[in-house]
Amino acid sequence: MRMYDLIIKKRNGKVLSKDEIDYIVKSYTQGEIPDYQMSAFLMAVYFQGMNERETTDLTLAMAKSGDLLNLSEIHGVKVDKHSTGGIGDKTTLIIGPMLASLEIPVAKMSGRGLGFTGGTIDKLESIPGFRTALSREEFIRNVNELHIAIAGQTANLAPADKKIYALRDVTGTVEQASLIASSIMSKKLASGADVIVLDVKTGSGAFMKTEEAAEDLARRMVSIGKLSGRKVTAVLTDMNEPLGQMVGNSLEVQEAIQVLRGEGDVRLNEVVYTLAAYMILGAGAADSYEQAKTKLIDVIRSGKALHRFAAFVERQGGDPDYILGKKSFAKARYIEPVFPERDGYLADCKAEEIGHAVLILGGGRETKESVIDHNVGIQICNHLGDTVHAGTPFAYIHGNSPDQVEEAKQCIRQAYTISEEKPSPKPVVKKIIE
């Protein structure tokens, strides 16, 4: 079996066998297939796609490429959440402490940045002292005692996905349904959670640009999960504009803290409460969506969720004073306003341009070796449908280089379309797939 032949086969739109997929995953993981050939194969998949059987075979091959995490030592039903990625998505930072304060175990393996901005691990590492490298024993102990642990993907947990994930990030092969589905579900299956809730983004700032494509991806992942004996729910959410008001690692942590204090952006709150409620339902900790939501409101109002976040941060080496407001996060050197070009309504947003602006500022990765600047980012003051005025800022740039700040300003202005007519509102939660 030769990788060259398999690249040609997929390039020509033919279906790969399970043995062929197993060979590709195993050989690439072991370093027998070079990056340039794997890149060619990923590009062939990007254009030709994979059928349901190929996607499942790829998922299982990646899941079995390393250790399958045994979470049987963790008490209760283990829940996990995963997002397909978007601009300003910080829901894990909020949902984890909320569920943990309800004594629902959240045992989560997260990744670094894929695309424009940092992943959950990058955001958490913007908290001084926080560490994401945990031993298996420490991970399980933290979940049993605090009901939450979030760690970076270990070297032996789906190592094939970790290696392919990094390569896709820099070869333009991220936005493909089978590759996204297999990447996400291989980690979820290897991580051992009993209940998985998937936040599938759709819109200009998502990998899936249309609702139809997002629903297709969601159904693929739900199918993979069910075939593997897991309880899976997918929630389709809007990403035609950033989620919340902050984009950038440290800024997003600070916005997450706002929500845990009972404040924060309305759209962000709606997504958070929806995802968390379905996680509670999956764990059997509520009889209805309304009851689950009431429990979430209670842990926010009582302060339990915020203090559980602080305890979680402290347990993983971070300074809880940043969470509790006793210390302030470092700021970027320059915080510059962005003014709209004219009065009107924000009618449309090319959300990827917002992500591109953060990348210009140094808040995302251009290559696998890129070092992220945790303090830079964008603050968005208005949502689509809001009225804006030429003399009032509708965004702020947080940057450490004057040239980067100016370039980012242009991206923000180009991202938005201003109209004289108020656009129709769009729901942020679009569909539930169970």
Image (cartoon, rainbow, N blue to C red):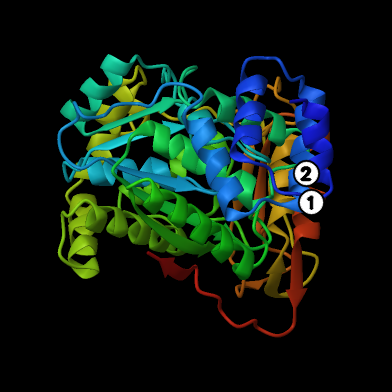
Q: Residue at x 68, y 50 (%)?
A: 176
Quadrant housing the N terminus: top right
Quadrant location of residue 358? top right
| Mark 1 crowdedness (10 Å alpha carbons): few <14, some 14-19, many ≥20 | some
Q: Nearer the viewer, residue 112 or 192?
A: 192
Quadrant location of residue 286? bottom left
Q: Dots 2 and 1: beta carbons under 8 Å?
A: yes
Q: CA distance from mark 2 to mark 1?
A: 5 Å
Q: Residue at x 68, y 71 (%)?
A: 346
Q: Position of residue 383 (x, y in %)?
A: 58, 66
Q: Nearer the viewer, residue 102 or 416?
A: 102
Q: Which residue is mark 2?
A: 10
Q: Position of residue 371 (x, y in %)?
A: 67, 21
Q: Is residue 50 left or right of residue 2?
A: left
Q: Give the answer, above or below, for where 335 lies relative to 86.
A: above
Q: Nearer the viewer, residue 337 or 355?
A: 355
Q: Amino acid at mark 1?
A: Gly
Q: Residue furthest bottom?
A: 421
- Residue 123 seen in this snapshot: no
Quadrant housing the C terminus: bottom left
Q: Position of residue 48 (x, y in %)?
A: 77, 52
Quadrant location of residue 341? bottom right
Q: Give the answer, above or below, for where 62 lies relative to 57.
A: above
Q: Amino acid at mark 2?
A: Lys
Q: Position of residue 4 (x, y in %)?
A: 83, 29
Q: Which residue is mark 1?
A: 13
- The residue tagged with tag 1: helix, strand or loop? loop
| Mark 2 crowdedness (10 Å alpha carbons): few <14, some 14-19, many ≥20 | many
- The residue tagged with tag 2: helix, strand or loop? helix
- Residue 101 seen in this snapshot: yes
Q: So how many labels did they put on this image?
A: 2
Q: Is residue 219 left or right of residue 228?
A: right
